[in-house]
Amino acid sequence: MKNKILILAFLLMSSSCSIFKNSQTISEKDTKEANDEFASVNIYQRFLGDYILEIMDIPKMYIPAGGDGSFTMKVTMDGDILKSEYTGDSIGAASWAIIKSTEVEDDILFVEIHVPDYGVTGYWELYVEGNEVTGYAFDMFEVVGTISR
């Protein structure tokens, strides 16, 4: 009986000291969630736009369609999903590389590419600083270009 009274007294004292209560109010929680959502949209904003890119020093034998390694593409958001697509003359000229997916990880834009003629899948890894774009294609070739928003 003595143990039960001690346990009851301990629980009563603990609950009266707010040990089991969440100190965050509902409005603070809602504000934090809204800020997190805004921050995630802002992360993608710098990658949205029209890209003019060139794969540097790529041997012609690696480009099945006989292109020159230059292409244009557009990165957009569809809801919360990033999408990339070729634009302008690149729609036909860059048909040798099919865009599979687009994502941002650690402030780097990754565009997954599949080259059906060679059965190879790889990534364009693009770094955007202001309007300048640098990066790598398939971890082998340097990519340079610009972005306009």
Image (cartoon, rainbow, N blue to C red):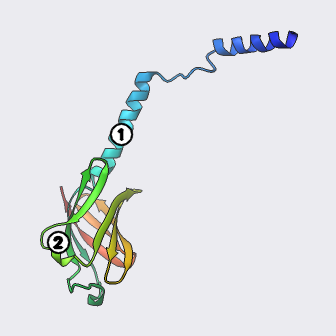
Total labels drawn = 2
Q: Position of residue 63 (x, y in %)?
A: 27, 84
Question: Is residue 129 toward the left or the right of residue 2 in the image?
Answer: left
Picture layout, residue 13 above or below residue 105: above
Q: As rendered, which of 129 and 8 lies closer to the eye? A: 8
Question: Is residue 59 toward the left or the right of residue 73 in the image?
Answer: right
Spot the residue most to the left: 88
Picture layout, residue 7 above or below residue 49: above
Q: Amino acid at mark 2?
A: Ile
Spot the residue most to the bottom: 61
Picture layout, residue 126 above or below residue 17: below
The residue that disc 2 covers is 91
Earlier in the chain: of badge 2 and badge 1, it is 1
Q: Position of residue 12 (x, y in %)?
A: 70, 11
**Residue visible at 36% across and 34% down in the picture:** 34
Quadrant of the frame with the N terminus: top right
Q: Position of residue 60 (x, y in %)?
A: 26, 88
Tell me the quarter of the picture where residue 119 sits: bottom left
Q: As rendered, which of 130 and 137 lies closer to the eye? A: 137
Q: Amino acid at mark 1?
A: Glu
Disc 2 residue crowd, few under 14, some 14–19, many 20+, Cα 10 Å:
some
**Residue visible at 76% across and 10% down in the picture:** 9
**Secondary-structure class at tag 1:** helix
**Secondary-structure class at tag 2:** helix
Spot the residue most to the right: 2
The residue that disc 1 covers is 37
Q: Are marks 2 and 1 in contact (CB under 8 Å)?
A: no
**How far is mark 2 from mark 1, CA to CA?**
33 Å
Question: Is residue 60 toward the left or the right of residue 18 in the image?
Answer: left
Residue 13 is labelled as none
